[in-house]
Amino acid sequence: MLPRSLYLLEMLSPAAPAGRLAFAFNVPAWSYNLLRPAAFSLSIPGIMADLWDSVLRAVPKKKTSHMKKRHRQMAGKALKDVKSLSTCSGCGQVKRSHVLCPHCVETHPIDIFALAVTDRQVLSASGASSLKVHSTTGADFPLVQSLDGAHKVGCHHVVTNGKGSRAASIGFGGDILVWSCRDDIWSKDEAASINNAKTVDVWAIVLSQDGQYLAGVTQNGHIKVWDLDAKGEEIRDYETKGSFGTCIDLSMDGRLIASGHENGSVYIFSTDTGRMPFSLCGLVNPARAVAFSPGGKLLAAAGDSKVIILYDTSSGEQVANLAGHSAWIMSLSWSHTGEYLLSGSFDGKVKVWSIDTRTCVATHSETEKALWSVKWLPKVGRSEGFATAGANRSISFYREATGG
């Protein structure tokens, strides 16, 4: 048996098993010096050692203020002087280059509800009494004419024919006015005036490509057609199932008329026979827009269902659904070649759809207010642009229908 002092030394030696604890009693005073180590070392397993190291490093640091972070983010991003200025060719006021003159469009104090496009001009109608005419031949789309006092309580639809020689507008009071254009100047066409006493319940209107016929859908679902060359004589009255008529369109060849209604119904009539070959289904909510493709083979319809439905006009079959809008679709417009379809919605977004791929190829969103009307502009070279208008009380022009 080892002496007590030697036994204690053995337990304190490095060769002793880790974690063993030894108690010694009646140890001489000189041995206390052996129990007082010069440096204390703690043996910790590997996982615990990593955790312990991270705890030691987690030293509280000084918090960076929001102002300091903001200063770092905005370093070098201060507002710069606007140097791209030009003079508006319409009113002579200074404006930003490549941007519509704000002095010209501020004359629309209320929502712009409709746009009509010719090969040289864009007509706009709003809740105000005047119609405005912008030129599309200039780079800044100047205001070239104002038809003051056209509709006393405002206008909600304005349409033109393909040649841009005749236009028609209808106000909130039910009055329909016919306009003619000579040398890019518009004036009332008194020879083609319509008896407004019989048009009080007409809501949406459309002109034939040659400008001879005007068609309108009424609040009780009827479709009426007038011959403007015969002093506005009514020549047709197509009857539907009586739901409020919200939109109407006429094919470019004049053979078909389509109307959309509050109950979601869409009807197609033949102008040759006067019969209704198709009563189309698919929209369970109110229809807001119908539009024939340039060749007349397809009909696009959309509204509160937030989906654009394409119909085959020869069979009435539903051939495609274009989904992507998150709000009511208020307006539709086909490109001149029929390759693209333009749509504007209540949430301010405008989308360009490829008919070949059945997909959205561009989305533009410069406003959060409703877009009441979207229209393709005349094709210049290889580029196709379009115009939009709505509750922001201004007209936006897009040069290219790509990107985004």
Image (spheres, rainbow, N blue to C red):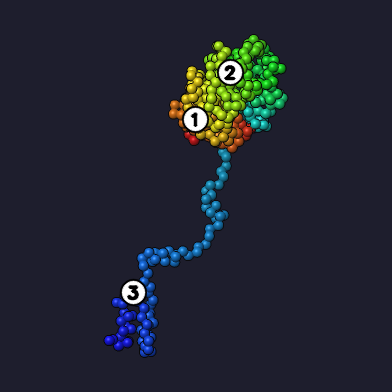
Badge 2 marks a residue whose secondary structure is loop
In what quadrant of the picture does the N terminus appear? bottom left
Number of other residues with Cα within 10 Å of mark 2, as a class: few under 14, some 14 to 19, many 20 or more: many
Q: Residue at x 37, y 87 (%)?
A: 25
- Numbered badge on residue 161: 2
Query: Hey, which residue is sitting farthest left in the picture?
Result: 1
Tell me the residue that label 3 is attached to: 18
Residue at horizontal 56%, vertical 38%? 83
Residue, x 70% and y 23% (percent of image)? 173
- Along the line of sight, the residue nearer the viewer: 265 or 35: 265
Q: Residue furthest top?
A: 230
Please tell me which of labels 2 and 1 falls first in the chain.
Answer: 2
Considering only vertical position in the picture, is 44 above or below 147?
below
Residue 219 in picture, x, y percent from top left: 65, 23
Which is more N-terminal, label 3 or label 2?
Answer: 3
Viewer can see residue 69: yes
What type is the residue that disc 1 sits on?
A: Leu
Mark 3 neighbour density, 10 Å: few (under 14) some (14–19) many (20 or more): few
The kind of residue on which mark 3 rests is Ala
Crowding at mark 1 (Cα within 10 Å: few <14, some 14-19, many 20+): some
Residue underneath mark 1: 322
Mark 1 lies on a secondary structure that is strand
Residue 374: tell me if it is visible.
no
Total residue callouts: 3
Give left or right: position of 165 versus 14.
Answer: right
